[in-house]
Amino acid sequence: MKIIEIDDDLYAFIASQTKHIGENASDILRRLLMPESPAPVRTPRSDAGSEVTDEVPAAIVDAELNTDASVAPSNVSDMVTPVSPENAADILENVTTEALATFTKRVDQFLFVLAQLHKLNPQAFDAVEQIKGKNRTYFATSKEALLSNGSSTNPKAIPDSPYWVVTNNNTAKKIAMLEQVLQKLGYDASVAQTVTSRFAPEGR
């Protein structure tokens, strides 16, 4: 498996093409660019007895936002329990364009979406702490933990939750973070795309 660095807008486009939770970046690109090419056959490794695979979250393509390999299995679907249809409907009912329009700042809209996700998934929300960048942590249960990554992280509390999140990133990065959170909590790609498009209707 090869890991490449790409720009935020390209990453966002690739992530937006995800058809199901657990689909990796290589398979997405193969489907888009080589539709006639069969998927590669994965074969067991003799040294570890496990499957050789490049199946990792699509976000690993972005060197600034990937899941820490020490806590993430090779297949995201192995660790994610899909949310109930009622939960999926609730997040779409709560995160509406009208609700987001009540906030004038993008960062406040970002925090609102995260707060709604925590409200609906309080027990599972600790999974977001696995979402890490190349050299920084994005979520933590204290401001100090995020400040230890650097003075420019601008951590803010997620309302009505014990969690904090870094906010000194652009809209494309916030979209990528929301996509990872939604995936970690078990929302399917269509729900994630709807939520992020409402968050940033003008595009990435």
Image: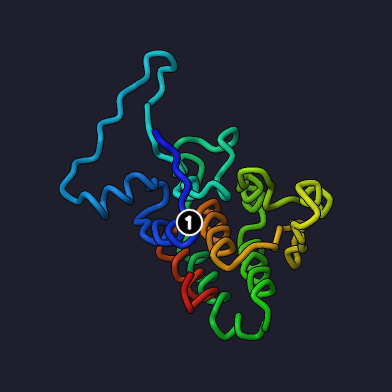
Of residue 122 and residue 27, the one placed in the foreground of this image is 27
58 sits left or right of 180 in the view: left
At x 45%, y 39%, the residue is: 3
* Residue ID at (46%, 47%): 61
Which residue is rendered at x = 68% and y = 71% of the image? 107
Q: Quadrant of the N terminus?
A: top left
* Quarter of the figure with residue 161: bottom right
Q: Please identify the residue farthest to the left as the structure is shown.
A: 36
Residue 76 coordinates in the image, percent (x, y)? 47, 43
101 lies left or right of 194: right
Looking at the rendered structure, the kind of residue marked 1 is: Asp
Residue under label 1: 7
Q: Nearer the viewer, residue 101 or 65?
A: 65
Query: Could you tell me which secondary element the residue under label 1 belongs to?
Result: loop
Q: Is residue 80 left or right of residue 166?
A: left
164 horizontally vs 67: left or right? right
Q: Position of residue 120 (x, y in %)?
A: 61, 63
Q: Name the residue at 50% across, 35% down.
A: 73
- State the image coordinates of residue 2 (x, y, percent, origin top left): 41, 36
| Residue 49, above or below 58 | above
Compare residues 74 and 4 and report the one nearer the observer.
Answer: 4
Q: How crowded is mark 1: few (under 14 residues within 10 Å), some or many (20 or more)?
A: few
